[in-house]
Amino acid sequence: MSKLQARNEAIVNAPISSVWAIITDINVLPKINPGVIKASGRMDKQGETRTCEMNNKGRKGTMTEKLVELVHEKKTVWAIENDTMGMAKMLKDPRFCFYLEKEGENKTKIINESYYEPATFAAKIMNALMMKRMMSKIQSKILSNIKELAEK
């Protein structure tokens, strides 16, 4: 796997099964990921793909990701297969991971990590100046959205 670039975690006051149901439901993805307008595909079976229509601060496009690793109620790992927004050109071997840890009957720790290597010299500079922080901010919002949905 590439280098860890961003990591966030949250404690969710809900059972691990509830959190798992949220992070593996394609219909919920637009509610948890702030850039996703619409999503299709599957998020609950290893080897499957999802395609997301994206709107990132006015930049619209699509991203197709493959679920390369899935361990029930423990872990999901997504890899970008192709996109129209230029991420695949800027980042080598990007991986986006969720890890779940049971903290109690009704408490779950959820960890979100992003791994990649900048693909060009310009991407290395952008990563150091803003991309890592931006990725961390997005992760934090995703975790906040998952927590809000799970705790309803």
Image (spheres, rainbow, N blue to C red):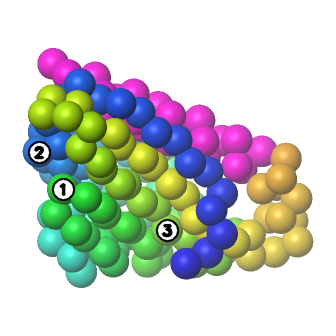
Secondary structure beneath label 2: helix
Dominant SS of magenta comes to helix
Q: Please, what is the three-letter code of the amino acid marked with disc 3?
A: Arg
Residue 20 image offset from top left, x and y in percent: 18, 48
Q: Name the residue: 22% across, 68% down.
A: 71
Looking at marks 2 and 3 on the same chain, the residue that comes earlier in the sequence is marked by 2
Callout 2 touching callout 1 (CB < 8 Å): yes
Q: Nearer the viewer, residue 60 or 72?
A: 72
Q: Is residue 147 magenta?
A: yes
Task: For marks 2 and 1, give the CA distance.
Answer: 7 Å
Residue 106 image offset from top left, x and y in percent: 15, 29
Check the image and name the residue furthest to the top: 152
Q: Name the residue: 20% across, 34% down.
A: 104
Q: Please, what is the three-letter code of the amino acid marked with disc 2?
A: Ser
Q: Is residue 42 visible?
A: no
Q: Does the magenta stretch include residue 27?
A: no
Mark 3, residue position: 95
Mark 1, residue position: 73
Secondary structure beneath label 3: strand
Q: Name the residue: 59% across, 35% down.
A: 137
Which quadrant of the rendered structure holds the C terminus? top left
Q: Name the residue: 71% across, 50% down.
A: 131
